[in-house]
Image (spheres, grey):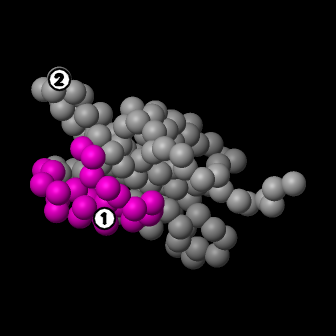
Amino acid sequence: MKPRGRCRKRSTLGSPEEWLVHAESDLNLARLGKDRDDVLPEQVCFHTQQAAKKALKAVLLHRKIEFPFIHDIEALLEIMTHSGLLVPPNVADAGALTPYAVEVRYPGYEEEITPAQVAEAIRLAESVLAWAAGTIARQEQSS
């Protein structure tokens, strides 16, 4: 019997398109949860962070740029800029989603997440996904 909580080892990173599918799924979960009383805003924001992170990693994978398996969106953006990728300001702003990866999704977080913050988190994730999908599609067309 396998111990609970063990992660599967990665045999492959998957394709950029698969990463985008997972990112879109996280964004859809955030959208579905945002107006529900039985879904915590912290969880909605966690899924926006996950969506943005996976979309950025899709671009890095597509560009064959190595990346660590981290939650820190700002660190991923830094890897992108150091690799010569032009990151528009609306995508760079997604670094604000990083705290939603860990800090706010567990009990004990003292600040209330407002509906305006939830809406902004969704907007940021949507911007990152649109940019990532467009970046990958443009590079595919030019290849």
Label 2 environment density (alpha carbons within 10 Å; few <14, some 14–19, many ≥20): few
The quadrant in which residue 136 appears is top left
Left or right of 35? Residue 3 is right
- Whether 139 is among the magenta residues is no
Which kind of residue does numbered mark 2 sit on? Gln
Residue range highlighted in magenta? 63-86
The picture places residue 71, in percent across and down from the top left corner, at 44, 62
Please check the rendered image and state whether residue 72 is part of the magenta-colored stretch, yes or no: yes
Q: Residue furthest top?
A: 141
Q: CA distance from mark 2 to mark 1?
A: 28 Å
**Which element type, helix, strand or loop, lies under badge 1?**
helix
Confirm whether residue 14 shows in the render.
Answer: yes
User: Residue at point 59% right, 64% down?
Assistant: 105
Query: Type of residue at label 1?
Result: Glu
Q: Is residue 111 left or right of residue 67?
A: right
Q: Position of residue 64 (x, y in %)?
A: 27, 46
Q: Residue at x 29, y 40 (%)?
A: 62
Residue that badge 2 annotates: 141
Tell me, for residue 74, which label it has, or none: 1
Left or right position of 81 against 117: left
Q: Is residue 63 above or below residue 103?
A: above
The image quarter containing residue 109 is bottom right
Residue in the foreground of this view, choosing between 141 and 73: 141
